[in-house]
Each structure stands twice: as structure tokens, then as C-alpha cells.
């Protein structure tokens, strides 16, 4: 059974601090990893994607992947109130005719002004 | 404007009355997918399609049907809706395999089955 686990939160972080969001996955052959942000009542939108071990930075966002530990994280530097949202971790395991994607249940992030 | 559209956005219906939720994208994307989102259960994939006339089951396909006769459209059909299908539904599309491509989500359809 493929699973993606996230702490549901809420995670409260002071404005200007670093928010750290974590995700673990069970399928060892997973190869693609995504972080989506979802504001309340809105649809998810892609924040970051990462495919190889290490860090990937994009502005205030850094995704970190450790395939040996089956762990992916998202760091948000200089957190802003507009970062308050639910963050969904998504994991792809591409097999023949099995191009499925599994989402975690999401972590609610609240940035304290 | 590049977008994924869904109709209707809100629907209240009764048990057993067949319904269709339409999804259309204007980005010439090959991959399309349907998800349902429920509190405490997250976003779960219902069906997906990697191209015209190719559809596959996701994790929660029971009670749903889909078709992909044209590249741009991917309707979700509930032949006999039941209350446990009350949920928020999202359609999404992607340029190619979701292994390496972003998914673009529609605005969502909130369905209530009484």
C-alpha cells in the first residue's frame, strides 16, 4: 500500500521565521516529489518539485529530498502571513500503466503576525 | 487564458439521480485526472487519463465512471450517487506524465448527495 504521511498541524510559525514541513513516503521506487499549496476554499497550486537527492531552492522555498530515508521536506524562509495555507506533499511512482500520484493529507501552516 | 474549468461549481442532488461533472482544459494537455477531497482524508485520485481513449483507475474509483473522447474534455459520471460521494471534486490536467510535470487544477465542484 503506497502511503504519504504528513503531520496535519496546525503548525504555527512567527512571521519572519523559517517554517519546516515534513513528509515521509512508503514506496521505495518513488521518483518524483511535489509540494502543492492550497488556500482555504481554493484549488491546489504547485510550489516546488524535486526529483533527486539534495536541496532545491526557489526564492524563499527550499525542497529537500532524502530517498534513503524516504523523506522530503519543504522549508519556507522569512515566513509571511500570505504563506498561511495547507501544504500538500505528493509522490509519484511511475510504473508501466500505473502513472498514479499519491497525496498526503496536508499540513496546515499558520503564520503568526 | 490557460485554464481548467469545471461545471457545475456547486451541486445538491438526491441519491440515485445520475449526474455528470464536466471538466475541460484549453492547454492541449495529454494527462487529465479527477480527485476528491474530504476532511481528514486528503486529496485522493479517482481516475486518470494519459491520453484520448486511455483511462485508468486511481485509488478510489468505485461508484464513478469517466470517458476521454476528446483531448480537452474529461467528464466524471456518477451513475447512482450515494451520500458517501458528498465531497469536493477537483479536475486537473498536465502536459504529460505527472512524473515530471505540474498538474493544473480546476476550481473545484462541491457536491452534496442527500
Image (cartoon, coloured by chain):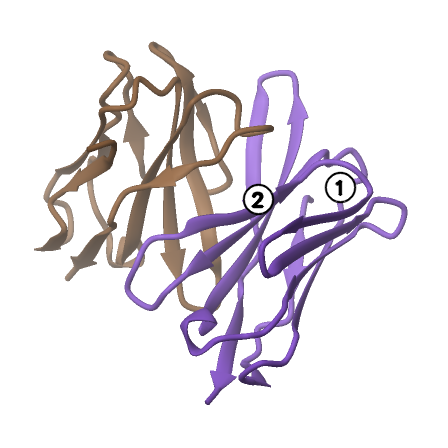
| Residue A97 in the image: above or below residue B99 | above
> What residue do we see at 10% from left, 44% from top?
B17
Q: Nearer the viewer, residue A60 or A23?
A: A60
Q: Can residue B96 be seen?
A: yes
Chain to which mark 1 belongs: A
Mark 2 vs 1: CB contact within 8 A? yes
- The residue at which mark 2 appears reads as A102
- The residue at which mark 1 appears reads as A27
Q: Nearer the viewer, residue A72 or B12?
A: A72
Chain to which mark 2 belongs: A
> What residue do we see at 48% from left, 61% from top?
B41
Horizontally, is A68 left or right of B112 in the view?
A: right
Q: What quarter of the picture does the N terminus of chain B occupy?
A: top left
Q: Report crowding for label 1: few under 14, some 14 to 19, many 20 or more residues within 10 A (C-alpha).
A: some
User: Which tint was used for chain B?
Assistant: brown
Q: Secondary structure at mark 2?
A: strand
> What residue do we see at 12% from left, 38% from top?
B18
User: Which tint was used for chain A?
Assistant: purple
Q: Quadrant of residue B38?
A: bottom left
Q: What quarter of the picture does the C terminus of chain B occupy?
A: bottom left
Q: Secondary structure at mark 1?
A: loop
> What residue do we see at 71% from left, 36% from top?
A51
Q: Report crowding for label 2: few under 14, some 14 to 19, many 20 or more residues within 10 A (C-alpha).
A: many
Q: Quadrant of residue A71?
A: bottom right
Amino acid at each position: 500500500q503506497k502511503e504519504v504521511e504528513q503531520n496535519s498541524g496546525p503548525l504555527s510559525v512567527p512571521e519572519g521565521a523559517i517554517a519546516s514541513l515534513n513528509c515521509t513516503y512508503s514506496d521505495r521506487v518513488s521518483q518524483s516529489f511535489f509540494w502543492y499549496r492550497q488556500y482555504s476554499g481554493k484549488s491546489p497550486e504547485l510550489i516546488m518539485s524535486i526529483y533527486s537527492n539534495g536541496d532545491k531552492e526557489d526564492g524563499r522555498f527550499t525542497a529537500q529530498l532524502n530517498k534513503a530515508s524516504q523523506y522530503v521536506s519543504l522549508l519556507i524562509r522569512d515566513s509571511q502571513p500570505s504563506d498561511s495555507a495547507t501544504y500538500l506533499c505528493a509522490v509519484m511512482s511511475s510504473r508501466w500503466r500505473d502513472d498514479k500520484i499519491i497525496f498526503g493529507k496536508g499540513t496546515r501552516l499558520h503564520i503568526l503576525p | 487564458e490557460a485554464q481548467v474549468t469545471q461545471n457545475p461549481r456547486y451541486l445538491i442532488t438526491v441519491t440515485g439521480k445520475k449526474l455528470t461533472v464536466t471538466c475541460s482544459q484549453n492547454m492541449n494537455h495529454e494527462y487529465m485526472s479527477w480527485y476528491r477531497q474530504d476532511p481528514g482524508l486528503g486529496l485522493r485520485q479517482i481516475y486518470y487519463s494519459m491520453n484520448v481513449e486511455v483511462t485508468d483507475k486511481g485509488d478510489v474509483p468505485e461508484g464513478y465512471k469517466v470517458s476521454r473522447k476528446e483531448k480537452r474534455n474529461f467528464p466524471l459520471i456518477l451513475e447512482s450517487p450515494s451520500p458517501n460521494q458528498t465531497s469536493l471534486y477537483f479536475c486537473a490536467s498536465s502536459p504529460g506524465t505527472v512524473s515530471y510535470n505540474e498538474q493544473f487544477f480546476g476550481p473545484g465542484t462541491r457536491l452534496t448527495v442527500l
